[in-house]
Image: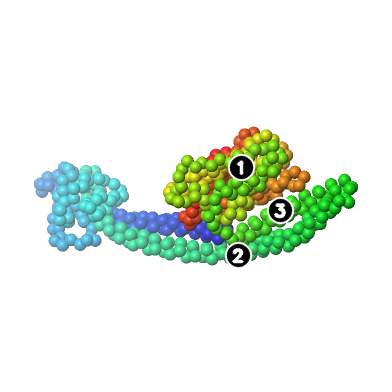
Amino acid sequence: MFQTTRRRLALWYTGVTAILLLVFASGFYLYVRGTLIERVDDTLSHVVEVVQRSLVVEASHAESSLVASSLKVNIEASFGDPPDEVDDDRIDLEWFNAEGNLLWSTLSEPLDVPIRLGYRGETVEIAEDYLLRQLTQRVVFNDNVLGYLRVSHPWFEVTKPARQLFIDLSLGTSLLVGLVAATGWFLSGLAIEPIQDSYQHLKQFTADASHELRNPIALIQTNVQVALADPELNVPEQRQQLEVIERLTQRLGRLVDDLLFLARQDSGMLQLDLQSCPLDAVLMEVIEEQQALATSKGIHLRLSLDEAKPPTIPGEEPFSVIGDYDQLVRLFTNLVSNGIQYTPSAGTVSLALKQRLHQGIPYLEAAIQDEGMGIPADALPHVFDRFYRVDPARQRSLVPAREHHHPSPSGKVMGTGLGLAIAQAICHNHQGQMTVNSALQQGTTFTVLLPKQRSKKIEAKSVPSKGINQLP
């Protein structure tokens, strides 16, 4: 339990920190990448301004006047000859006339990219995995277009440092998340340690107190029984008081036994005596033990075995499981006595046992159904809680949350409020599942699913349903 809590705390701490680091790293990466792009665009704009100032504009004919239609750019004087060698990181220039025809370029091959004007650069794909950042501006003289100047810059000037930054941030973030996970695990251990110590002391106190209370309770009960057996006890009032004391000591003894069981269960001290247990024999023994109580209330106990399916393993008993026989008896005793407690006179408590196969794993399914008043829907999720009680405003018959009950000598039934919690714990110990279906005034069905063979791959969990069977 504490390891699960510690693990959750560490995961939450690591997850929150990882999200914050991811947001920071993403923002930092986008900021740096945007800065690189802005720097390239500024360089392209600066080149355009320099080239525009260096253009040589002349008249198309010497004798003509300087009118806009007779002006042109002297290509040789303005640009010179294109360079023979091309560097990977150089800035390339292209000059187009007013009609958009390419007249001069530093590129070895003309680009198949249309002219797109803009005040900011744009990224264009020239070839696979080769991009250029381009800026195109219209060159105007005396309100007339002389041509278009396009400058291009290799995109790897942005992608190369951005990619390296991405790698560095990924490695750094991963390392920090790992360190945070280790730190979170350490700090969560420190935070849980005093709670765990207190809980261990509380469990040890409960176990010790339960153990120490058993002897005096047994002595009181023995003395009361001896007094009741005295033939000279003829005063009815005294006999009645002694019977009350006997019932209370029996109930207190059962409560101590239940607390001791749960304390050992929580502390991991409970050991299972695993063996091959015929579950049909377990149910028959439970019915035999509960028959007297059922008969006194006029309730019929019925057991049905579904032997239609052959054994999943040749030669194996069809209803055998690997488990602790005594604990299985206690599990079904709690459920059957619970059904007897809430079933009206002349009713029936039905037990059904059958084989199931789920995801290649053989199971045995045991269902205990009563004909009682049912459990309210809002109480179903809590029926396995220890000492849980339904809203006191409800009927007295509905107050106990389907708890573990035992008959007293006088025929009255008393409960400790721990019966279903114990049944669930035993079910967990056998890697099983337990669910409950109930409808008011129609009855309640507890279903126990036990694997025939114990396996580490089987997850033992029990989730109370709200009127819907949730078994696989």
SS category of the residue bearing label 3: helix
Q: Quadrant of residue 446?
A: top right
User: Looking at the image, is 103 positioned above or below residue 87?
Assistant: above
Of mark 3 and mark 1, the one earlier in the sequence is 3
Q: In the rendered view, does 222 fall on the left or right side of 142?
A: right
The disc label shown at residue 254, or none: 3
SS category of the residue bearing label 2: helix
Residue 418: percent from left, percent from top: 67, 50
Q: Mark 3: which amino acid?
A: Arg
The residue wearing badge 2 is: 193
Residue 397: percent from left, percent from top: 71, 39
Closest to the observer, 413 or 177: 413
Q: In the rendered view, does 429 fall on the left or right side of 295?
A: left
Closest to the observer, 416 or 228: 228
Residue depth check, mark 2 versus mark 1: number of the one nearer the observer? 1
Q: Mark 1: which amino acid?
A: Leu
The residue under the point 59% across, 61% down is 271
The residue under the point 17% across, 56% down is 106
Rendered-image quadrant of the N terminus: bottom right
Q: Mark 2: which amino acid?
A: Glu
The disc label shown at residue 82, or none: none
Of mark 3 and mark 2, the one earlier in the sequence is 2
The disc label shown at residue 380, or none: 1
The residue under the point 58% across, 65% down is 190
Residue depth check, mark 3 versus mark 1: number of the one nearer the observer? 3
Rounded to the nearest angstrom, the CA distance separating label 3 from label 1 is 25 Å
Rounded to the nearest angstrom, the CA distance separating label 3 from label 2 is 33 Å
Closest to the observer, 154 or 292: 292
Residue 241: percent from left, percent from top: 84, 49
